[in-house]
């Protein structure tokens, strides 16, 4: 990883001095003199006041890092879009790369926000000391993500696969399917200590690099790690959503073999753990025959499940202070027969945590790349834009949604979109200095 550490020296107070023979000419004028004079003033002021010099350098450094983060956000999205592009075959999509690009974009966004906060504090408090270290990188692949770069996190998955191979060699075991899966389980869940997070409240459990680092994550991310490790061992793992669970199993032409019990557990249970043996889970009712009836998730589907989890997580965190608030709550109020025509205005929009709301919107944007014709997803995306007070974009997304939605859903959306459009017009009206209120005829 290419990085540069630097610090801003604190010089002793000094006053500008001039050489003994220093001439100032007033009879010579040049078109660049005013620029030279300005540079001289900055240099002499900085020399006289080191804190002022600190401020100038910090401003330049912050501006440079802002550009780095903004470029990282854009590049991450571009690389994610190319990775899941419909022009490439689904089997060629790397789940790990796609989700690391997601983590890189969100990480750069949060770092950008922290940098903006630091600059605000710096502007408010002139005596704030400079950061002790600043990191720069030349490309997205060199950007630090939880202490490592994207290539290093991919190498971490390679290392896990090598640990499995070493375990098989130490046992002097061949490549029988059961032994390979038992070795994978041993390395992942005993040696590495990966565990499933029961409740998703911490965002680090929903990003691939954080799960590899903290060793605790959501069920879908643990499944993705399992799939990626087995792929490196030449073993194809497939999966499907069953109720609230995402189940995985080795691809085989004889699914009934997965349910044969040996050493107290079936091969299906070895891979999926306790949920298969829990009578409250739909997975406990599966057999070799019913397994054939399940729809196998594509790589794009699996990425979509991970993104949907991110949307739910960040929306829940964004609306924490508005208990019970749903994305579609405003639709019910607008369609209430007792609602006054102009009750929906900006003052009624709940205040949400802006960073978490933006992260939910970003996850929704990526999911829409995968599912552009999903009307319910586009509706929810438009509602998040409404909560974020981006009324123009919300009108656009909800209008597109109405074209795909069932007729009864479009009828619910229509009055809301009309009033939302009115709110946007009213904002423009007031920005021009007009008073009064626009009303729907």
Image (spheres, rainbow, N blue to C red):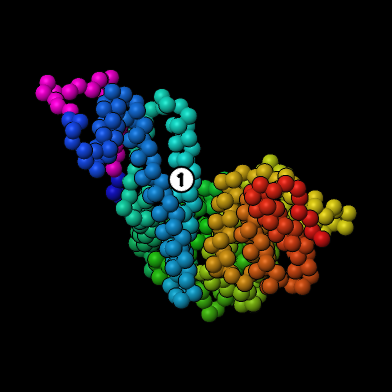
Spot the residue most to the left: 21
Count of residue discs: 1
Q: Kindly identify the residue that appears in the image at 27 percent across and 38 percent down.
A: 34
Q: Is residue 341 left or right of residue 184?
A: right
Is residue 272 visible to us here? no
250 shown above or below 55 = below
Q: Main secondary structure of the magenta part?
A: loop
Q: Which quadrant does the C terminus fall into?
A: bottom right
400 shown above or below 69 = below
Spot the residue most to the right: 338
Q: Is residue 99 left or right of residue 169?
A: right
Asked if residue 13 is among those painted magenta in the image, a careful observer would answer yes
Residue 80 is situated, as x and y percent measured from the top left of the image, at 46, 63
Is residue 115 visible to us here? yes
Residue 196 is situated, as x and y percent measured from the top left of the image, at 56, 51
Q: Kindly identify the residue that appears in the image at 78 percent across and 62 percent down.
A: 415
Q: Which residue is mark 1?
A: 112
Q: Kindly identify the residue that appears in the image at 66 percent across and 47 percent down.
A: 433
Name the foreground residue: 30 vs 97. 30
Residue 58 is situated, as x and y percent measured from the top left of the image, at 36, 35
Q: Is residue 40 left or right of residue 239?
A: left
> Which quarter of the picture shows residue 24?
top left
User: Which residue range is magenta in the image?
Assistant: 4-24
Name the foreground residue: 380 vs 152. 380
Asked if residue 302 is among those painted magenta in the image, a careful observer would answer no
> Which quarter of the picture shows residue 302?
bottom right
Q: Tell me if mark 1 has few (under 14), some (14-19) or many (20+) residues whose alpha carbon lies within 10 angstroms of its own.
A: many
Q: Kindly identify the residue that appears in the image at 34 percent across and 55 percent down.
A: 139
Question: Tag 1, which secondary structure?
Answer: helix
Q: Is residue 415 left or right of residue 241?
A: right
């Amino acid at each position: 990883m290419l990085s540069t550490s630097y610090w801003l020296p604190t010089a002793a107070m000094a006053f500008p001095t001039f050489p003994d023979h220093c001439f100032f000419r007033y009879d010579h004028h040049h078109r660049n003199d005013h620029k030279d004079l300005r540079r001289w003033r900055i240099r002499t002021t900085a020399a006289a006041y080191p804190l002022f010099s600190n401020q100038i350098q910090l401003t330049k450094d912050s501006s440079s890092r802002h550009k780095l983060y903004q470029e990282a956000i854009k590049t991450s999205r571009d690389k994610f879009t190319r990775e899941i592009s419909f022009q490439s075959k689904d089997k060629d999509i790397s789940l790990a790369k796609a989700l690391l690009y997601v983590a890189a974009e969100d990480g750069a966004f949060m770092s950008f926000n922290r940098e903006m906060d630091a600059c605000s504090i710096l502007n408010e408090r002139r005596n704030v000391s400079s950061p002790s270290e600043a990191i720069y990188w030349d490309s997205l692949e060199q950007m630090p993500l939880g202490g490592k770069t994207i290539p290093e996190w991919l190498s971490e998955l390679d290392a896990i696969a090598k640990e499995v191979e070493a375990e098989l060699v130490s046992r002097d075991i061949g490549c029988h399917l059961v032994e390979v899966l038992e070795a994978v389980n041993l390395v992942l869940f005993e040696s590495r200590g990966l565990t499933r997070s029961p409740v998703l409240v911490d965002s680090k459990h929903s990003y691939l690099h954080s799960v590899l680092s903290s060793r605790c994550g959501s069920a879908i991310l643990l499944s993705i790690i399992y799939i990626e490790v087995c792929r490196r061992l030449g073993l194809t793992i497939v999966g499907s959503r069953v109720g609230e669970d995402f189940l995985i199993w080795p691809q085989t032409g004889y699914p009934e073999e997965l349910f044969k019990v040996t050493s107290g557990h079936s091969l299906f249970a070895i891979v999926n753990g306790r949920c298969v043996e829990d009578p409250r889970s739909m997975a406990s009712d599966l057999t070799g025959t019913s397994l054939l009836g399940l729809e196998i998730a594509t790589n794009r589907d699996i990425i979509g499940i991970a993104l949907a989890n991110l949307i739910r997580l960040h929306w829940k965190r964004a609306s924490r202070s508005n208990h019970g608030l749903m994305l579609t709550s405003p639709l019910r109020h607008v369609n209430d027969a007792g609602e006054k025509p102009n009750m929906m205005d900006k003052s009624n929009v709940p205040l949400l945590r802006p960073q978490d709301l933006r992260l939910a919107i970003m996850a929704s944007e990526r999911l829409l790349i995968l599912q552009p014709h999903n009307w319910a997803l586009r509706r929810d995306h438009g509602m998040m834009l409404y909560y974020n007070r981006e009324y123009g974009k919300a009108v656009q997304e909800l209008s597109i949604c109405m074209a795909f939605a069932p007729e009864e859903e479009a009828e619910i959306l229509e009055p809301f979109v009309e009033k939302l459009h009115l709110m946007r017009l009213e904002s423009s009206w007031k920005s021009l200095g007009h008073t009064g209120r626009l009303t729907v005829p």
